Image (tube, helix red, strand yellow):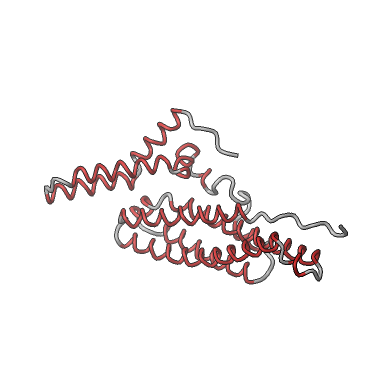
Amino acid sequence: MSPSPLSPAERGRIRWAAALRPLNVMVLVIGVGIFATTLAWWVPPLTLLTYALLVFFSARDPIFGRRVLHGREAMGRAPGVGNQDVSPERRARWLPRGETRERVEAALVVYHKVVGAIEESDEVTRAVLDDAVPKLHAAADRLVDVAQGREKATEVLRDLRQHAGASASEAEGGDVRALRERLRAADAEISDTLERLLALRSRVVRISIESGDPEGVAALNSSLDELNARLEALSDTMAPPEAPAQGH
């Protein structure tokens, strides 16, 4: 179900919050400082253009909009992702023991280290990475969603093979091939998510050292947006077809 459209007042609140967002305001401050030092004519228009683009994209960010309208507590988990009452770590423990569960749990350990690195950083870094934390929570939940979908697909694939019996042509039918493709995609994405989270942890440390470098912050948020989009898209395709009933 798509979210209800925002009212003009709600859109106005989001735009105003985007205009005052610490990262966006910092771009203005940096631009003013550079202009005061160099008096280069191109600095003011470039600064204003960058600021306007940041405000535009912030106002269109659904996670930022939900946080503005509903507060931080509502952003502990992205709505519609996983089970909002159960932590991703607990949900991961419900997975069958095996390689998938081990990789998911390893990724969740790194996820906690990334969140911890943000929360333990200096005030400037925490301010500019404020939006990264809910995105990390969403990615952790979606990763478990993908893993759960993978295990369900594995069960259905097993049932399809048993139903097909000794018929090789039926065992290699469209449903089986589709499920195998989904399993390969899920395995690749789970492994890739672990690598992406490791890279994100390094970026957080670098941003902290460089006192909230705007380019580094933008790259980190872009990586998180891409990660969430990939996991969400894969999760949506992991719902397997129903296994055929026995005895027909």
Q: Quadrant of residue 152?
A: bottom right
Camera-side residue of 245 and 6:
245
Q: Residue 183: which quarter of the image?
A: bottom right
Q: On the picture, is 85 further left or further right than 195?
A: right
Q: Which residue in the rendered view is the most extreme toward the right? A: 247
In this view, the residue farthest toward the left is 39
230 vs 39: above or below: below
Q: Position of residue 83 (x, y in %)?
A: 63, 50
Give how far across and how far down residue 59 sits, in percent.
40, 40
Which residue is the extreme one toward the top?
8
Q: Between residues 84 and 173, which one lies in front from this camera angle?
A: 173
User: Number of labelled discs?
Assistant: 0
Q: Quadrant of the N terminus?
A: top right
Q: Residue at x 68, y 69 (%)?
A: 97
Left of 66 or right of it: where is 101? right
Q: Residue at x 42, y 58 (%)?
A: 118
Is 228 in front, or is 115?
228
Asked if residue 114 lies left or right of residue 123, the reply is right
Compared to residue 62, the image places residue 212 above or below, namely: below
Residue located at (88% from left, 59% from top): 247
Percent position (x, y) of residue 148?
65, 59
Locate the C terminus by quadrant: bottom right
Which residue sits at x=33%, y=48%? 23
Percent coordinates x, y for residue 169 in the rendering = 75, 67
